[in-house]
Amino acid sequence: MITLFITASKYIQLLLIVLYTYCNFRYLSIPDQEDADPLCDWQLRIILLVHFLMNCIIYLKTEEMSTVWFYLMQLAFFLLYTFGAQRIYRNINRLLLNNTVFFLTYGLIILERLDPTKAFKQFVIIVGSAILTLVIPYLIDKIWDLVRWRSVFAVFGLLLQGIVLLIGATSYGAKMSISIGGFTFQASEIVKITFVLAMAGMLSRATEFRDIVKTSVVAALHVLVLVACKDLGSALIFCIAYLVMLFIATNRAFYLMLGTAAMGGASVFSYYAFSHVRKRVFAWLNPWSDMADRGYQITQSLFAIGTGGFAGLGLYQGMPKRIPIVEKDFIISAISEEMGAVTAICIILVCLGCFMQMMVIATYMEDNFYKLVSVGLAIEYIVQSFLTIGGAIKFIPSTGVTLPFVSYGGSSLVSAFIVFAIIQALYIIQGNEDEA
């Protein structure tokens, strides 16, 4: 009977996530959010049902009462966060709100399967981040004038990156994190937000060519420090975000082409300058020739995805722990193995849906600064998602970045909450202005 329930739940989950993904894109085709509210209600019901079914499987497999209490804690948080946010902000974007809970649900499910201790730590950070970032839309709307702080954001970002370069801890060939008061965090996750705010502020106030040059120099300094830290994944995210923002601000394709050519040259330089880059490129090009060493991580990821097939093996039926750092860079491989390629594809499509919604919000914004902020954060979000997933499926070399809201990691989680809170703030501001 238990086996029948577990098998049935696996296929019900697949049906539900496909339905959720359909609702996601159906929402984007509805111009008035009030007309889309019933769709959002169904999305939330789907999330909660998937959450219940997967946690039932976790309990049946572990037979530990602690999993039930953990499920109830998660359920209480999801309900309080969802309805609390809607209560506080009447004009909140419900699609982004639902998608946040959607990603958190799948992240916690797979993390609890991989390592219950890490899942609980992740949950604690989720609750803290959610509470703290709930005030961001109010602060941006009523108190903060972010564009006036553009120079502060730029200086802060460069100083923080400089500290990482000087005293940061090295992990997998790159300096990425620093420890303060016993807490370790990845500085680039915070700087990528201040970077967008600084660049948006400077570009929105640029009236002459020399202003563009000054802004580009500041952007280049951010990227060069990241390169010096050997954090090339973050450097690539910063580069692409700035180039798109520059194109939107100036409407000159020449800048975009020039920047793309520069990135191509920088990629070649990085290959010859950094040994860990050559190792990752080798693992990408021909992982099968050195499966025991350089190609081990990517081959195990591909084995996991292939073994899972479209429907997945089911929770606790696979061996995702064979993949090094599976809870971070390769979380999508673990999901694909045990919950199916269909689930992984739907998660990718929901990421794309979030990006599309962010870009739609950018088109709503009348203030050029807010428009550039929305575009910059949207580009960073989708590029980071692409780099994570692309590395796991051998589409591109692994870059070491995480999947927002899904992968394990406090810095990534806090950063994702802040990004979505800022986007929500812009949506709320424009909604309030439309009603005025």
Image: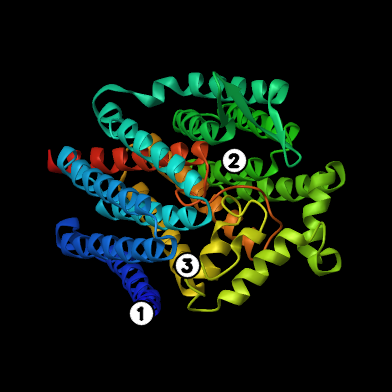
**Left or right of 253 on screen, residue 82:** left
* Residue occupying the point 30% across, 38% down: 425
Q: Residues within 10 Å of mark 3 (few under 14, many from 20)?
A: many
* First of labels 1, 3 by sequence position: 1
Quadrant housing the N terminus:
bottom left
The residue wearing badge 2 is 238
Horizontal side, residue 367 vs residue 91: left or right: right
- Residue displayed at 63% across by 61% down: 392
Q: Secondary structure at mark 1?
A: helix
Q: Position of residue 330 (x, y in %)?
A: 60, 57
The CA distance from mark 2 to mark 3 is: 36 Å
Q: Which residue is mark 3?
A: 315
Name which residue type carries label 3.
Leu
- 387 vs 239: above or below: below
Please determine whether, in this image, residue 419 is positioned above or below residue 42.
above
Q: Are marks 2 and 3 in contact (CB under 8 Å)?
A: no
CA–CA distance in space, label 2 to label 1: 44 Å
In depth, the one of 261 and 282 nearer the eye is: 282
Residue type beneath disc 1 = Ala
The residue identified by callout 1 is 8
